[in-house]
Image: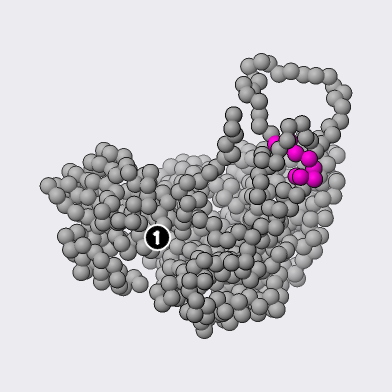
């Protein structure tokens, strides 16, 4: 298909800008561009068609089942979009007087209160723009805490080998040294390895629970105790909160701070590049280090305040506010009864799907899972040559988005499924039938699957070439 | 089954090593390149860097994942294979003809296996 630059015709436009009423202003010569900027010039109808064409080549939650493990691609209710589209939330400026945006302030205040209740934390900042940014902010909290106590030896962050790749990356970005510990045979944290790893140099532990295998670590209280006794803090990666929200709280598991992915767990469509929101919650003793712009209420007036020893701002203004509006709408529509119902159904759906697949596919850790489960296609690959990638690509022909492939790294030929709570039994039954068909196809016609998908707008892209010779920008002729 | 040359030594972490006049040449085994899949990027240390036996000296990125490469020996990097930085596919095409780094001033080694013992390691992993 043609790119926007290729559709561009000089002088064509899609906007009629209002007349300038403030007079012309020309910036200082030294700030002017040396060369004219390349901007596509396109009519509205061509622009619309371009994006519609792109849309037809993709797969979204509105197209079909989307069991992309670790990503929580659940359906986001329309009402959350509607609330976030209200002009009183969208037609505002971050610098306008607080007395004119009290409703928005109330949203931040209420969302903080409710999300603290869900996580078992005492305070929360909405500044971080998404998950990894939240991790980074949480780690800065841990660093501030140790620095403030003049405990400068604590430079290690312990991360299990099943962790999301962002955990060690964020820890390194925040100036820590990453210490990896292995998983035990049941996919949980190896307690002896943890005991050996902690010491005077331990700043903290980063953990996802349930972990990336979709398993809840039954030793969680012991784990956080070991870290605390060594003088470290415990950080909860909220990536998998969808499995436990409303049922068990990170704060009660012994965690000192958490980040949430509001866009995953609390109803913002995601996967297209944002905006997301990665609020960070903490226990009282860490509150004084949080970023600026905490919302407080006095005499029925909401205002911003900076914590006593704040780390400063981690993002401009107050974070991605509209994502918080959606999260608050979601929480209020589901309520105290609906939130645990959602997590319960997420877990039920995953177990049902795993149970129906496990006679054919090999389940990596065959036990009751949480909101997601991992298959290992190592044997299938050995017997048929059909890989996890081939099965994933094959599912595209049936209108199913592939599960997550080759993650977590500790499982070979991994396929990771997260059906999410918003899928019906009919949808999951249909998907199971398709995966069982694909399994048979691997034996009867492996070549067919090596070349799948066959019926999609795009066949199989050459991902090796894309990685080895990436084309990252449009080359103009001049 | 993978063919692992008899004249090389191997680590449990799937590197091969060859010693000649005190210089140790290090590469990835057939099992490693096959499990990784198509390698798209290789990250190597610089000449003059020290490497430690059993510790990561670089990483290889395939379409699936990024994996550490561990040094079979402790010493100083004498040479790196610049060619694979531009053409990482060489590791997939000819893993025993394509080395990653050469190490000299070697002070110690990891537990090194012969081809037969290494094949047992691979068989147990599969």
Circle count: 1
Q: Secondary structure at mark 1?
A: helix
Display coloring: one colour
Residue A153 locus on image (x, y percent): 40, 45
Q: Nearer the viewer, residue A397 or A123?
A: A397
Which subunit holds the residue at mark 1?
B
Residue A18 locus on image (x, y percent): 86, 30
Crowd band around label 1 with a 10 angstrom C-alpha radius: few (<14), some (14–19), many (20+): some
Residue A432 left/right relative to A363: right
Q: Is residue A216 visible?
A: no
Residue at the (47%, 54%) spot, across then down: A464
The image quarter containing residue A180 is bottom left
Q: Is residue B107 visible?
A: yes
Residue at the (59%, 29%) spot, across then down: A478
Q: In the displayed structure, would residue A238 be above or below residue A436? A: above
Which residues fall within the magenta stretch? A40-47
Residue A396 locus on image (x, y percent): 61, 67
Q: Residue furthest bottom?
A: A359
Residue at the (66%, 40%) spot, across then down: A6
Q: Nearer the viewer, residue A41 or A271?
A: A41
Q: Nearer the viewer, residue A242 or B113?
A: B113
Residue at the (29%, 71%) spot, across then down: B1
Q: Residue furthest left?
A: B21
Residue A18 left/right relative to A325: right
The residue that mark 1 highlights is B36
Residue A41 drawn in magenta: yes
The image quarter containing residue B118 is bottom left
Q: In the displayed structure, would residue A364 be above or below residue A74? A: below
Residue A410 locus on image (x, y percent): 43, 65
């Amino acid at each position: 298909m043609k790119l926007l630059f290729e559709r561009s015709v000089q002088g064509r436009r899609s906007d009629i800008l209002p007349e300038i009423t403030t007079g012309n202003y020309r910036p200082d010569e030294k700030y002017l561009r040396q060369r004219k900027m390349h901007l596509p010039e396109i009519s509205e109808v061509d622009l619309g068609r371009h994006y519609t064409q792109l849309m037809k080549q993709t797969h979204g939650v509105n197209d079909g089942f989307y069991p992309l493990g670790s990503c929580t691609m659940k359906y986001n209710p329309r009402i959350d979009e509607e609330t976030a589209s209200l002009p009183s939330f969208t037609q505002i400026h971050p610098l306008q007087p607080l007395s004119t945006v009290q409703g928005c302030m109330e949203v931040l205040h209420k969302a903080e209160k409710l999300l603290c209740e869900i996580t078992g934390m005492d305070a929360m900042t909405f500044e971080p723009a998404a998950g990894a940014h939240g991790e980074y902010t949480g780690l800065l909290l841990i660093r501030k805490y140790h620095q403030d106590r003049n405990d400068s030896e604590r430079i290690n962050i312990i991360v299990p080998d099943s962790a999301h790749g962002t955990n060690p990356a964020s820890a390194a970005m925040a100036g820590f040294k990453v210490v990896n510990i292995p998983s035990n045979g049941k996919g949980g944290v190896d307690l002896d390895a943890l005991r050996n790893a902690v010491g005077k140099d331990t700043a903290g532990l980063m953990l996802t629970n349930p972990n990336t295998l979709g398993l809840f670590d039954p030793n969680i209280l012991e784990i956080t105790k070991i870290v605390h006794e060594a003088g470290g803090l415990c950080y909860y990666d909220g990536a998998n909160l969808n499995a436990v929200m409303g049922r068990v709280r990170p704060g009660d598991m012994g965690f000192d701070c958490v980040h949430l992915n509001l866009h995953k767990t609390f109803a913002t469509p995601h996967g297209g590049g944002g905006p997301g929101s990665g609020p960070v919650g903490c226990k009282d003793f860490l509150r004084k280090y949080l970023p600026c712009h905490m919302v407080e209420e006095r005499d029925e007036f909401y205002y911003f305040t900076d914590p006593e020893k704040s780390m400063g701002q981690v993002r401009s203004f107050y974070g991605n506010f509209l994502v918080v509006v959606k999260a608050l709408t979601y929480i209020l529509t589901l309520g105290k009864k609906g939130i645990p119902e959602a997590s319960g159904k997420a877990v039920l759906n995953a177990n049902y799907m795993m149970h129906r697949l496990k006679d054919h596919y090999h389940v990596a850790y065959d036990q009751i899972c949480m909101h997601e489960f991992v298959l290992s296609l190592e044997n299938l690959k050995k017997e048929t040559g059909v890989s996890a990638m081939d099965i994933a690509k094959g599912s595209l022909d049936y209108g199913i988005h592939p599960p997550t492939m080759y993650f977590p790294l500790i499982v070979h030929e991994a396929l990771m499924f997260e059906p999410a709570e918003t899928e019906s039994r009919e949808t999951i039954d249909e998907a199971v039938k398709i995966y069982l068909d694909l399994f048979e196809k691997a034996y009867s016609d492996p070549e067919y699957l090596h070349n799948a998908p066959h019926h999609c707008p795009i066949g199989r892209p050459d991902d090796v070439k894309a990685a080895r010779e990436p084309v990252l920008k449009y080359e103009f002729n001049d | 089954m993978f063919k692992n040359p008899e004249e090389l030594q191997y680590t449990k972490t799937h590197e091969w090593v060859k010693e000649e006049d005190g210089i140790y040449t290090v590469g990835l085994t057939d099992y490693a390149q096959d499990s990784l899949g198509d390698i798209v990027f290789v990250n190597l240390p610089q000449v003059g860097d020290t490497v430690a036996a059993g510790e990561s000296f670089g990483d290889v990125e395939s379409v699936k994942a990024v994996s550490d490469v561990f040094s079979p020996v402790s010493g100083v990097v004498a040479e790196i294979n610049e060619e694979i930085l531009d053409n990482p596919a060489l590791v997939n095409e000819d893993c025993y003809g394509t080395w990653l780094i050469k190490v000299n001033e070697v002070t110690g080694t990891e537990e090194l296996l012969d081809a037969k013992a290494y094949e047992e390691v691979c068989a147990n992993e599969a």
